[in-house]
Amino acid sequence: MAQVSQKIRISVGLGACGIAAGAQKTLSALEEAIAARALDVDLSITGCMGMCYREPLVEVRAPGKPGVVYMEILPERVPRLLDEAVAKGQLIQEWVATGDDGGGSEQAFLARQKRIVLRNCGHINPEEIDEYLAAGGYQALRKVLSGMSREQVIEEVKRSGLRGRGGAGFPTGQKWEFCAKAPGTEKYIICNADEGDPGAFMDRSVLESDPHSVLEGMVIAGYAIGSNHGYIYCRAEYPIAIHRLNIAIAQAEKKGYLGERILGKDFSFHITIKEGAGAFVCGEETALMASIEGKRGMPRLRPPFPAISGLWKKPTNINNVETFANVPWIITNGGAAYAAMGTEKSKGTKVFALAGKVRRGGLVEVPMGMTLRQVVEEVGGGILGGRKLKGVQMGGPSGGCIPESLADTPIDYDSITKTGAIMGSGGMVVIDDSTCMVDVARFFLDFTQKESCGKCTFCRVGTRRMLEILQRITEGQGREGDIETLEALAKNIKRGSLCGLGQTAPNPVLTTIRYFRDEYEAHIKEKRCPAKACRKLITYRVIAEKCPGCGVCLKVCPVKAIRGDKKVPHVIDPAICTRCGLCMDKCKLKAIEII
Amino acid sequence: MTECACAQRLLAQDVDLTQVDKVIAAHGSDSGALIPVLQKVQDALGWLPKAAMDRIAAGLRVPASNVYGVATFYAQFRLKPVGKYIIKVCHGTACHVAGATKITEAFERELSVKDGETTADRMFTLESVACLGCCSLAPVAMVQKEAHGRLTGDKVAKVLAEYRKADGGK
Ligand SMILES: Cc1cc2nc3c(=O)[nH]c(=O)nc-3n(C[C@H](O)[C@H](O)[C@H](O)COP(=O)(O)O)c2cc1C
Ligand code: FES
């Protein structure tokens, strides 16, 4: 890190979002330009800095000084960045995303956050174990192995009040204790990195940006429970995370933090990575274990719980990525320090993938107890394009939509559950008034319906029936009584399903009916979509006063639904129009509207 | 599988089973090896031809029905050959509310295929996936490993043109 070097350090944020925004090209441009200028600097990579909406991000840090994060650094910005910010040490004010010194407009994005899980994300190079060590890494493991008993470790985790971050919020210390006390000598630790919620990327970012913190948490859990082998079950769609985990495991083994006789003590622990193969239900713990065993990922009835009979029928402790990443901090700083944050029953912090119609989308970590509104407005900077907040979707397909009227709900397990949504693993999608809530419900049902493993009839067939009804409603074919049928189906699916997938699948529908019933009724009774989002219920129209008859839309229309002579306002034929929206995208004069 | 059986037979002749054998040998008879073996074989061949699945069944000594059952359970496994470039249009929550449906339709229009299909010239395969993890760039599509963010129906043609050009102006 900075202390081992007296050079200026330039780090490029190479998380998946940075790479998507072109950070790899930025890195190459920097390499070339640094060589051309013969600058004596450290060029490094780092993980996700959290400000995904400003990618690609590049941090410039002079020795002994706080770093300055520059935003949207594409190759064309590289020469000026090197000439001014690096060579001359000047600040390029208009490119600053934020500085540790508090400068910059995006200060609020970080000021309201509390970074424990993300403590190293965006600061260290995730492919260099030395940087993790310099940031205090593996100190917790050292502390554990040089004098703490297994019971003391579990006690410390219990004291922290940490609850599982994978969704259900089960107390972690208690789970460890069950497994530690379970009879048997061969036990397993599993890290659930399947991250199935289709609007969430917390776990991926942690694995890409700070893989050692997860490994360290797993080794500590292994010691506490008496296990010598761990598995990380990671989504196959996360190639960068898997790549960095492999590097981290190799480096940790080499330095003696993993493998045989860790730190010379009488304790060994090995970690194997298993790639998922694209099934949402495999995030469920019993399905996940079936998948590791090479079978179809079908959940089974519990009990027996994994703590008694899990992987290969041995006692198994399974936790989420974020849960493990909290552990080293708790051991180092003490459970009490962790429990000092948050609310009475929800301690510590929670990481969210903030996305949707919010100005500053990205990876955020806030203390429990902060309200949803604070997250959206203060951390997220409010709604994009000056539109209105309509609600917040939490917990993905198992969760629900919390309306704006309840935006002052504090973020803790119990308060969120009371709204009908769930805390979930951390997906938080902000919804504005241009989004149709019936369509959102249909979207999630479509997802769970496809992902149902098919074992329970209610889940397999019931979700299908619900989807058909929602489909009809959004197409203007809704009928009197549809809402009641949806509610009845929901109740039976919840009751008749074996695993969490079916038990929670109706939640997005139930919460939208509960809070946005008027939108359902507008679709059913008036055949109208208030958000103007449902295709079959809208019409594209040319605003004659604004249309100079330039012919652009006419040419772009793939079905030739637009007619009109040059210099005369054009007309769209609704009978031919497929509502693809291409004309609206193309019209620079904004002369096309949806009615 | 419902495609024409003679096409299967034709394709089966092209399958390089020595690659399959190599993967099986590397994994030995590990318990739980089936999924990793299928993944590696698909990496090597691009998809899972029936001949390869039969070979895996024999090599790992599991019933062919198990292999087929697992291969059809997981979305990752492809039972049909794919194009040179795989286009994954994100249909995660953020991309959905940002208009992912229109993006898929634009690709369908430009390529004259439906979602899940491959173009006749075997250049492109169009797929839908859930969350690519760059939600702040929604709507997003990934071509091979390259993500394209903030797409519009209009930009889709430009993205495709890039790859066609890179491939020799086809
Ligand atoms: C359908 C379904 C999907 C799930 N997906 C995930 C997931 O992607 N990641 C995760 O950590 N937990 C997921 N879970 C929860 C796990 O079953 C399990 O409770 C969790 O991994 C326990 O870890 P924790 O105590 O640290 O939260 C899912 C549960 C269900 C029912
Ligand atoms: S929803 Fe598309 S990238 Fe996350």
Image (cartoon, coloured by chain):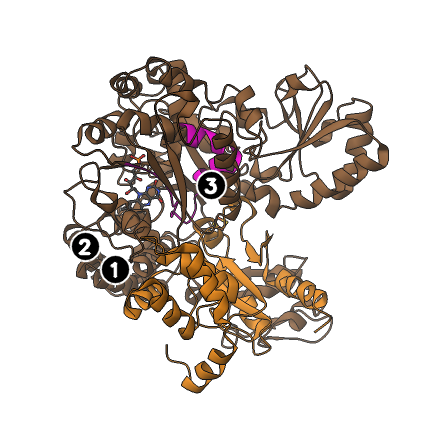
Colour of the chain lettered A: brown
N-terminal-most mark, 2 or 3: 3
Say whether residue A476 is visible. Answer: no
Q: CA distance from mark 2 to mark 1?
A: 8 Å
Left or right of A390 in this view: A565:
right
Residue found at the very far bottom of the displayed protein: B6
Q: Position of residue A573 (x, y in %)?
A: 54, 75
Circles 2 and 3: CB atoms closer than 8 Å:
no
Image quadrant of residue A75?
A: top right
Mark 3, Cα crowd under 10 Å, few <14 / some 14-19 / many 20+, is many
Q: Position of residue A385 (x, y in %)?
A: 56, 43
Which stretch did the figure color magenta? A188-216
Classify mark 1: helix, strand or loop: helix
Classify mark 2: helix, strand or loop: helix
Depth check, front residue: A312 or A20: A312
Instruction: Verify whether residue A193 appears in magenta.
Output: yes
Amino acid on which the number 2 mark rests in the picture: Ile
Left or right of A98 in this view: A529:
left
The residue identified by callout 1 is: A463
Left or right of B123 in this view: A550:
right
The residue identified by callout 3 is: A204
* Chain letter of the residue carrying label 1: A
Let me know if marks 2 and 3 both belong to one chain. Answer: yes
Is ligand 1 within 8 Å of the beta carbon of the residue shown at mark 1? no
Colour of the chain lettered B: orange
Amino acid on which the number 3 mark rests in the picture: Arg
The residue identified by callout 2 is: A493
Q: Nearer the viewer, mark 2 or mark 3?
A: 3
Q: Nearer the viewer, mark 1 or mark 3?
A: 3
Depth check, front residue: A118 or B23: B23
